[in-house]
Amino acid sequence: MNANVYQHFRSDERPFIDTVEDWIEQVTMQYAPLLTEFLDPRQAYIVETLVRQNTDLKFKFFGGYEAAERTRCLIFPDYYEPEQDEFDLVLYEINYPKKFTSLSHGKILGTLIGSGVKREMFGDIISDGENWQVFVAKEVHSFVQLQVTKMGNVSVRLEEQDYTKILVPKDGWSEERTTVSSLRLDTVISSVFNISRQRSKQLIEAGKIKVNWTETVRPDFLLDLLDIVSIRGFGRLQIQGIEGTTKKEKVRLLLGVLRK
């Protein structure tokens, strides 16, 4: 891999880039398909960029449904025709006493990871407002089903569901355009959610902000294409397009926004 591939990405993404290089090499050498774990949109973007730049290999992403945020990627030689069931996804419905309690995305994710399985084995967690489902990698699905019997102090049961029973997620992203003076995390948050830079800094430093599901406490963190930012209490945003600059050197952004 030539070192200048790194310059297009953040320095903290280098270990992931090296992993992707290994995947590409494996498919090229063995001339056989490779299935990744679940990727977030930013990681998927890196995979797509590297596969396109360096090879004649093909790739396909799938996370269980059309608008899935977290997907697995199949990287394969150009002769190969992938089938949907090769993505090795299992859909679980979370059965819980709805009359007496409610679940949240955070509570479910915390419990799943608490079962001893890493984050990359779980896809999207979706809800129609009352019912909840989660996509799990087939490699670990029976282990997870055995381990997860409580969320907090609530008894739950994971029940495998057919794809035809997938929920229609309640919250859709709305598309918005804005201009910002820079791609700094504090700047983008204050612009999109209409709060002061100071307030936005406080939220970041208090650990209330995650970028691609990882807590980020640096206000000067520079966002990039397809990053997803969640702001506790406010909602989420995704950088869906960076569309050049204005005459006054402001950056034009296309965003997906989910307001609480």
Image (cartoon, helix red, strand yellow):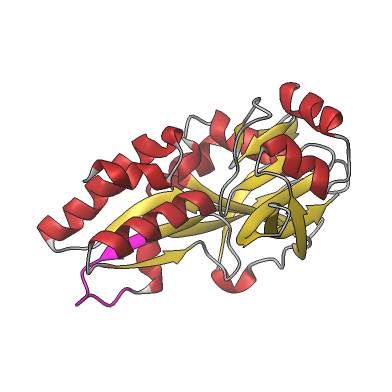
Residue drawn at (37%, 37%), measured in percent from left and top? 14
Name the residue: 46% across, 44% down: 121
Residue shown at the point (60%, 48%) measured from the top left: 158
> Quarter of the image holding residue 162?
bottom right
Q: Is residue 40 visible?
A: no
Residue 136 against residue 167 in the figure, above or below:
above
Residue 159, horizontal then vertical, whole percent: 59, 54
Taking the view exactly as shown, the residue that stands out farthest to the top is: 206
Q: Is 77 colored magenta in this rendering?
A: yes
Please give left or right for residue 84 compared with residue 55 in the image. right
Name above or below for residue 229 compared with residue 113. Answer: below
Residue 12 falls within the magenta-colored stretch? no
Q: Position of residue 60 (x, y in %)?
A: 39, 68
Q: Main secondary structure of the magenta part?
A: loop
* Residue 189 in view of the camera: yes
Extent of the magenta region? 74-82
Q: Nearer the viewer, residue 188 or 145?
A: 188
Residue reaching furthest to the left: 29
Q: Is residue 147 above or below residue 249?
A: above
Which residue, as the protein is rendered here, is positioned at the far front? 247
Picture quarter containing residue 127?
bottom right
Q: Is residue 40 left or right of residue 201?
A: left
Q: Count all numbered tags in the image, as a single digit.
A: 0
Residue at position x 26%, y 41% in the image: 3
The residue nearer to you, when weighing 201 against 114, is: 201
Quarter of the image holding residue 168? bottom right
Question: In the image, is 2 to the left or to the right of 93?
Answer: left
On the image, the x and y values in percent for residue 77 come to: 21, 69
Q: Nearer the viewer, residue 56 or 115?
A: 56
Q: Position of residue 4 (x, y in %)?
A: 30, 44
